[in-house]
Image (tube, grey):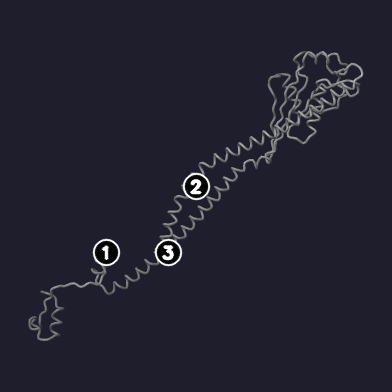
Amino acid sequence: MAGLGEQIARQQRTMGPLLVAAVVIGLIGLPVAAWLDLRDLSERMLRTQASEISRIIDEMRGFYGSEVVGRVLKADDAVTATHNYRDVPGAIPIPATLSIELGKRISAHDGSVKYRFVSDLPFKGRDPHQLDVFERNAIFALRANPREPIIEVSGSLFDRHVRAAAPVVMGQVCVTCHNSHPDSPKTDWKVGDVRGIQEISVNQPIAANVLAFKYLLLYFGFAAAAGLTFILLQRRQSALVQGINKELSEANDFLAAISLKIAKYLSPQIYKSIFSGQKDVTIATERKKLTILSRSELGCPSAVDCQARRHLPQL
């Protein structure tokens, strides 16, 4: 039992500093892990944005080089701007056509950013595009208030999809072109009218960023391991305490049985003084004065009479 007590005391002396260290690490580790993960996440997002911007600029440069500069250099006559520039030698695309063609190129790649130029009043002969609910609502809302951008956020538990629509406002050059072009479906445009929308879609899968929180995952793993270790140590200490209690119970039962047996051979006063602690149970010598009387002094003619007289009550 003494060995178990020493073991428990040793565990308690060890658990104290461990608990203090665990609390300190827990308080400091969580903000540090969150900061490191946010830094990595920001760096990851910046790299993704830089890559997407670089890809978009490459598409714009490539389209400008092949469809504008290249056609101008090959032109024998005067250069014109038209929506069906591919059918006219030496022609270059007008701004709306430029936006449409760039949108096709940018959206053709499997990237997180897509661009599209859409209108409910396209020129005749353009490839048909069926407007969805977001695009129809965005055109209607931006014509009512061009200064209020339209943003829609959707997705599931594992990814998020953001669509943002900005108005395409008619300038003086656009108004002159559209009002005089034979393929224009509307010929009474005014400066400041909203022709259509430029839509930018950004898709961000959440599952791809889960690994960005590696420091938090490590922190939670360490916290779980520390908690499990603490529980195991507590259970071990509880088992030791139960063992000590069992030994104490057995010892008490043994002492109770012994005391009952001893009580048969001791007077109640001595038994009480011993088991209450008033008298130590030790082997020791003690001197006392005794008076020995003979039978003649007691007035007993024989030993039997002395024995009988000793048991008679005193009158």
Do the CB atoms of the residues marked 1 and 2 lie less than 8 Å apart? no
Q: Is residue 3 above or below residue 170?
A: below
Residue 124 visible somewhere in the drawing = no
Q: Crowding at label 1, few (<14), some or many (≥20) Cα neighbours within 10 Å?
A: few
SS at badge 1: loop
Residue that appears at 60% across and 39% down: 37
For discs 1 and 2, the disc positioned in front in the rendered view: 2
Q: Which of pointers 1 and 2 lies earlier in the amino acid sequence?
A: 2
**Mark nearer the N terminus (3 vs 1):** 3
Point out residue 190 in the picture as x, y percentages from the top left corner: 78, 13
Q: Most extreme residue toward the bottom, as rendered?
A: 302
The amino acid beneath tag 3 is: Lys
**Identity of the residue drawn at 51% across and 53% down:** 231
Return the residue at label 2.
22
Instruction: Residue under label 1, please give it.
Output: 277
Q: Is residue 158 left or right of residue 82?
A: left
Q: Are marks 3 and 2 in contact (CB under 8 Å)?
A: no
Above or below, 123 relative to 56: above
Dot 3, how many residues are within 10 Å of its Cα: few (below 14), some (14-19), or many (20+)?
Answer: few
